[in-house]
Amino acid sequence: MKEIVLFTTSRTVDETVQRLGELGVVDIKEIKQPEGKIMEKRAEAVVRTKKAIAILQNFKNKKNKSTAGTNLNLDDPKRLVERVLRTTEIRKSCQKKLDTLTEQLSFYQTWGENTNLEDFGFLRGKGIYLRLYLVDKPQVQPLSKKYTLVSFPGHEGKVPIALISQSEAEKLKGKEEQLPELRFEEIQKQIKRKQRQLIEIEVFLKDKVGYLEALEDYWTILKDQLGIQHTLESMGDVGGKLKYLKGYIPKDTVNQFKKAAQQQNWGYAISEPEKPEDVPVYIKNPKWIEMINPVMKFIDIVPGYKEVDVSIYFLVAFALFFAMLVGDAGYGAIFLLIALLLRKKIPGQARLLIYVLSGATIIWGVLSGTYFGSEQIAAIPFLNNLIIPNIASFGVDNISFMMHLSFLIGAVHLTIAHLVRCAQFINSIKALSEVGWIALVWGLFLITEQLVLGKTMPDWGMWLFIAGALLVMLFSVESKSFLKSMLVSMANLPLSLISGFSDIVSYVRLFAVGMATAAVAASFNGMILPEGISSLGIVELIVAAIALALGHGLNIALALMAVMVHGIRLNMLEFAGHLGVQFSGEAYKPFKLLSSEVGGENEHSKTITTG
């Protein structure tokens, strides 16, 4: 990345910002905090328009409406936004009123449609007080002996009773029925009126769905206006006559920027960044590596500007970890089938990643003989010949080997991290400390095997610790004081060794979770089909199929959760920790006008005024 400072006059600043947005390569940093009523209004307009689009989009999806061929011109988008948003308020108000009216209507369903509310007031004026209750049937007889009651036919397990008294204070224990505010006929009229309003809202939204694309274009304009205003207000000012901004551009866009600056007569300075911690991170990988981007965006991490890009290492390791943690060829086939069926709806990078993860899972499942946790399928001669006994899920005792394999994968994974750091510091004595760490990793691997699996560490294993520790202590810290740097490294070494040991042991989760996935699948099969399918009738077969689908669906969900927890963790904590990556970076986000990406007007010509 290159740091730039751009100067322009106050008279041409609007045009400059517009051109910068069209150029779309400068990640602009605020010189002063943007604030002002114009910014607030533009931000509010963007939010409100987005809400209006969401309302129309939800209506279209709910009603399965198609807007193809109905993209209409829009003369007053601002008014349409307000009207669409207003429908939400009206709908809520209508629904709230309907709930109230329905509650009042239930009174008449209990006490009769002919109940006259005025009679209660008339009797009260004559000194007769009428109170209504709903009580359990066994309570009616005892209450009748103490009070003057009139009972009515039971309703929903309760008996409606009316207490007649000449004392206003006389009441029964329990909740008294509240009289409705409106008469029965009036409630029915208002319910019909509110239902009619809801239908009118549906008709209105149906009529406005055709303006969805026009509203989206309007939102794009508003978003661009907000970005321009934000840039204008965050620029520095010199005496009211000169404006300037700071930012960063990728090295491969410097010539593009210089050409635009020459055309627009901008003053600028381009230099190497002074503060690496402030520089945004611009990562550009080959397309086959970029398939991991959806995962990186999901966990929302970016390496620091001076840190190593872990994309390729993450991709390779994540595919292996995914395959081992899920470990079932049947599940992998389901993932692949879903990706193929939904290929038009899944974004390109995510779709390609699913293909790779599915393929890796199928390969591991075939080699381990795991097909929906069924030993019978794995026993088919052709499939059985493809199984590698040491990693088979059924029929062999391979726990020791699988733990050994997990530790070995961990040691190799961490070694790669230190090899990358060794290349990173190739012109520094720190490279020797990374060589030392590689020796320590393999020493820790051998001692892990001894402690966990009971394998005796070879005699030369101790020399890995001695040589590795010496290299780490002597060359980890660059300092003018050799003795001081060695003492610092020596003090840190014990905790680092303990951490390294726990990191290698952590990789055993690949075996443990993968084994659990296969075991749970086999358990579901055993519970649902204890004697196979040959003895089942058609109905029993259908029920068993549904139960199997639910059971394996739950197991797949648990396996995917395990991938998110363990597969990502081994990359982000253990591997990244040894690689020295702290993911402290901020992604490169250039100021770019959205309208410039689509080239202004598209094939549907529209007339839009921003108002």
Image (cartoon, rainbow, N blue to C red):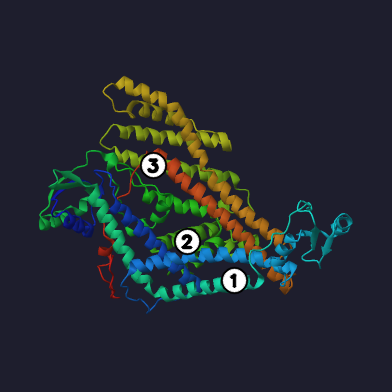
In this view, 430 is above or below 285: above
Instruction: Assign a secondary structure to mark 2.
Output: helix
**Badge 1: few (under 14), some or many (20 or more) residues near its Cα, within 10 Å?**
some
- Mark 2 = which residue? 359
In this view, 42 is above or below 468: below
Image location (x, y in percent) of residue 28: 25, 49
Instruction: Tell me, for residue 417, which label it has, or none.
Output: 3
Instruction: Assign a secondary structure to mark 3.
Output: helix
- Mark 1 = which residue? 191
Instruction: Tell me, for residue 168, which label it has, or none.
Output: none
Q: Residue 486, located in which quarter of the rendered image?
A: top left
Image location (x, y in percent) of residue 89: 48, 63
Q: Is residue 591 visible?
A: no
Q: Residue 189, located in which quarter of the rendered image?
A: bottom right
In the figure, is residue 252 to the left or right of 372? left
Query: CB atoms at circles 1 and 3 under 8 Å apart?
Result: no
Point out the tag, 1 or 3, that comes first from the N-terminus: 1
* Alpha carbon distance from label 2 to label 3: 26 Å
The foreground one among 358 and 2 is 2
* Alpha carbon distance from label 1 to label 3: 70 Å
Instruction: Assign a secondary structure to mark 1.
Output: helix
Q: Residue 388, located in which quarter of the rendered image?
A: bottom right
- Nearer to us: label 2 or label 1: 1
